[in-house]
Amino acid sequence: MPTATYTKSGTKASSPVRLDSDIFGVKDINHRLLQQSYDSYLANGRRQLAHTKTRGLVRGGGRKPWQQKGSGRARVGSRRTPLWRGGGIIFGPTGKQNFTKKLSTNTKRKAIIQALSAHNLAGSLRVIEAIELKSKKTAELNKLLSKLDIKGYTLIATDSLNTNLKFASRNLDNVKVVEAKYLNIARLLDADTVVLTKPALAILSTWLKPATKKDKV
């Protein structure tokens, strides 16, 4: 399927590039699959930092506060009881909780394919021949992106992250640059516009294109 292509300077190329319909032309978008893949990515990157102390870990409270009978007060065995202020916590987080959600590699690839197709069908996908900046200045990259009719949060996928592009995009809050081989579902769904370079397209085609029977043999 043909898609408008931009030159290195940001002008529209005379000949549009044809995108693989198996990767960029999926019309039946499975929103449930996208949600599962997105939730799985966030859950697998979650760090369990919350940790509370049980009554066995709280400091102090080795002596019985008062005798069992005769004082008229309720019986208490330790100052570390969860019923008292400063005591242990009942059923609190221990730092050992496992929030990971496993998905198969094939499912993750399908989700990325559908996210790319959704951007392409919505008209929020841009293809540029290459991004070759002469300096590390943010203004140079910002000027190039303004020619691509880009709106909102932008994700740029390239074949390699060179020094000029890395430093030029660092001060742009609405621009994120990643290598195509590290593209993930969270980056794609968070982005309002996706910019792909031609070398990045080749990487995505090799990575995401479904294997045929000949390839499996």
Image (spheres, helix red, strand yellow):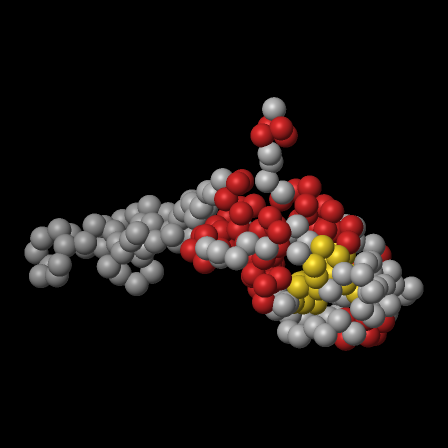
Q: Which residue is at the front of the view, 55 or 211?
A: 211
Q: Position of residue 32 (x, y in %)?
A: 42, 55
Residue 184 in view of the camera:
no
Question: What residue is drawn where x is 46% and y is 42%?
Answer: 102
The residue lying furthest to the top in this view is 217
Residue 180 in view of the camera:
yes
The total of numbered circles placed on residues is 0
Question: What residue is drawn where x is 77% and y is 75%?
Answer: 146
Question: What residue is drawn where x is 26% and y is 61%?
Answer: 84
Q: Which residue is at the front of the view, 121 or 114?
A: 121
Q: Position of residue 190 (x, y in %)?
A: 57, 64
Q: Position of residue 44 (x, y in %)?
A: 50, 48
Q: Which residue is at the front of the view, 186 or 50?
A: 186
Question: What residue is drawn where x is 19% and y is 54%?
Answer: 76
Query: Where, by quadrant of the figure, is residue 15 drawn?
Result: bottom right
Q: Which residue is at the front of the view, 100 or 158?
A: 158
Query: Where, by quadrant of the figure, is residue 83 drawn?
Result: bottom left
Split into 4 quadrants, where in the image is the N terminus?
Answer: bottom right
203, above or below 147, in the image: above
15, above or below 105, in the image: below
The residue lying furthest to the right in this view is 134
| 165 left or right of 215 in image | right
Query: Where, by quadrant of the figure, is residue 142 drawn?
Result: bottom right
Q: Position of residue 215 (x, y in %)?
A: 63, 30
| 2 left or right of 191 in image | right
Split into 4 quadrants, where in the image is the C terminus?
Answer: top right
